[in-house]
Amino acid sequence: MKRILPLILALVAGMAQADSNSDYRAGSDFARQIQGQGTGSIQGFKPQESIPSYNANPDETKYYGGVTAGGDGGLKNDGTTEWATGETGKTITES
């Protein structure tokens, strides 16, 4: 029995190795087939066709001054004004 056990273990390990090789090969073949499809989808994306009310230059761009810009670009002042005078702000304040 002691002589057969190592032989059985070697056979099982060999079968597992063969199975993992075929799984790798299948995954590699699939990846090769779909290579570049994600990049093509992003490069050909037209947001105005997919996103309702899309605007390439919305009014809110005035608040963004770039990565190194300081301050809030007037966002705090505009928010406070809208809270005090806008319908949404009034409704929340009254409730």
Image: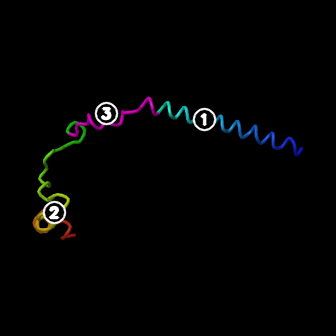
Residue at image mark 2: 69
- Asked if residue 6 is among those painted magenta in the image, a careful observer would answer no
Earlier in the chain: of badge 2 and badge 3, it is 3
- Asked if residue 33 is among those painted magenta in the image, a careful observer would answer yes
Q: Are marks 2 and 3 in contact (CB under 8 Å)?
A: no
Foreground pick, 49 / 11: 11
Task: Please tell me in which quadrant of the rendered image residue 72 appears.
Answer: bottom left
The residue positioned 20% from the left and 67% from the top of the image is 92
Task: Describe the element under mark 1 as helix, strand or loop.
Answer: helix
Q: Is residue 43 left or right of residue 77?
A: right
| Residue 41 rendering spot, x and y as whole percentages | 31, 35
| Residue 42 rendering spot, x and y as whole percentages | 29, 38
Few, some or many C-alpha atoms within 10 Å of disc 2 (few <14, some 14-19, many ≥20)? Answer: few
Residue type of the residue flagged with mark 2: Ala
The residue positioned 83% from the left and 43% from the top of the image is 5
Task: Please tell me in which quadrant of the rendered image residue 54 appears.
Answer: top left
The residue positioned 16% from the left and 63% from the top of the image is 69
Q: Give the Cα distance between marks 2 and 3.
A: 34 Å
Q: Quadrant of the N terminus?
A: top right
Q: Quadrant of the C terminus?
A: bottom left
Q: Give the magenta-colored segment's residue range.
A: 31-47
Q: Give the Cα distance between marks 2 and 1.
A: 53 Å
Earlier in the chain: of badge 3 and badge 1, it is 1
Residue at image mark 1: 21
The residue positioned 48% from the left and 31% from the top of the image is 30
Residue at image mark 3: 40
